[in-house]
Image (tube, grey):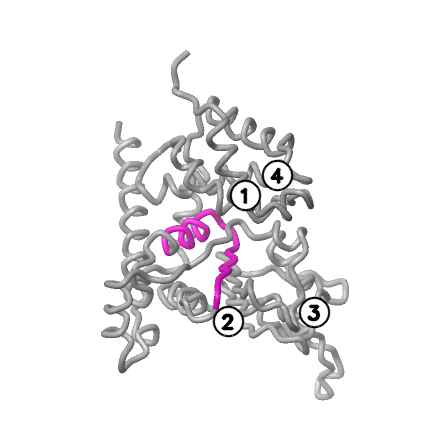
Amino acid sequence: MARQRAAAHTQEVIAETFEALVTNVERVIQGKADAIRLALVCLVAEGHLLIEDVPGVGKTSMAKAIAASLGCEWHRIQFTPDLLPSDVSGVNVFNRATGAFEFRPGGIFANVVLGDEINRASPKTQAALLEAMEERQVTVDATTYMLPTPFMVIATQNPIEHEGTYPLPESQLDRFLLRIQMGYPDRPSEIEMLETHGDARVVDDLEVVAEAADVVGMTQLARSIHVHPTLKGYLVDLADATRNHSSLALGISPRATLALQRSARARAASEGREYILPDDIKILAVPVLAHRLVLTPEAALGGVGPDDVIEEVLGAVPVPTGRA
């Protein structure tokens, strides 16, 4: 009984910390609570986030607000065509005073890394992120360096401007746990934005509301969230439905199924629950799965989008009720 009370207290603290982060980021980004919550769920799930939308809707501001709300080290990397892989991962430099090579870490060595306009860098530079995002380490000249904990990459890209860009390949997209869009704010939120941002940079005044240890605690709790066997079957049924869908040339992989389960656990933890619900899976299906799907040429020409396919699959696969 005492252990259950301690666990409940921990879940309550985690939920309170999560809400404090949401409230802090909302000081910068008005009217986008859903996008903020998804971004923070990605943080709790130990994933990486891709924010894709048109210019000027707050992609970089939200990434900076999340980083500023955490008492962690964070770096910003502006991805440009002339950015080198060594600028990201680091390089060995010869020190004449000591007569030996010294490793100088690149921008990836931080708890939170903001990758602005990631699709403007060359594929070779984009590939420098693969090992870091998947294995939390960087290898330079056959020496492996571990990245700090927690570690998260928040990348942005503009989906409508293609001149001078290099589209992310499927292997790179698969490293991002969630892909979200910001969208335009509603009228009251945009009016509030004019009041808030009219004469000051709010992101520079944000207070730190969670330390690195708090983030680690949230991620550890999320790993222990219970997933009922029927919900595991539901996850597999969703994956199987995408693999046999007529509009898809490539359905989701087992790694994507694991990503959806991990995200659902993080969402449950953020709400102070010990278990996931079918709604956790359904709410996260599009941001977790859509960017991992490959449409057939016929579907793409017909105007079908990955989001449409996920919604169709969610409507077709029966939701478990918990009854025998």
- Please say whether residue 145 is one of the residues in the magenta stretch: no
How far is the residue under mark 3 from the one under mark 2?
20 Å
Give SS at disc 1.
helix
Q: Which residue is tagged 2? A: 75
How far is the residue under mark 1 from the one under mark 4?
7 Å
Q: Which residue is tagged 4? A: 252
In the rendered structure, are the residues bearing label 2 and label 1 in contact, judged by CB atoms less than 8 Å apart? no
In the rendered structure, are the residues bearing label 1 and label 4 in contact, judged by CB atoms less than 8 Å apart? yes
- Please say whether residue 53 is one of the residues in the magenta stretch: yes
Q: Say left or right for 160 vs 24.
A: right
- Mark before the other along the chain sequence, 3 or 2: 2
Mark seen at residue 289: 1
In which quadrant is the C terminus drawn?
A: top left
Q: Amino acid at mark 3?
A: Ser
Which one is closest to the eye, mark 2 or mark 1?
Answer: 1
Give SS at disc 3.
loop
Q: Which residue is tagged 3? A: 122
- Mark before the other along the chain sequence, 1 or 4: 4
Give SS at disc 2.
strand
- Mark before the other along the chain sequence, 3 or 4: 3
In the rendered structure, are the residues bearing label 3 and label 2 in contact, judged by CB atoms less than 8 Å apart? no
- Mark before the other along the chain sequence, 2 or 1: 2
Tell me the crowding category of disc 1: few under 14, some 14 to 19, or many 20 or more residues within 10 angstroms, Cα based: many
- Mark before the other along the chain sequence, 1 or 3: 3
Tell me the crowding category of disc 3: few under 14, some 14 to 19, or many 20 or more residues within 10 angstroms, Cα based: many
Give SS at disc 4.
loop
Q: Amino acid at mark 4?
A: Ile
> In which quadrant of the rendered view does residue 172 lie?
bottom right
Give the vertical position of 288 relative to 201 (above or below): above
Q: Residue 246 location in percent, x, y? A: 64, 33
Q: Residue 118 location in percent, x, y? A: 59, 66
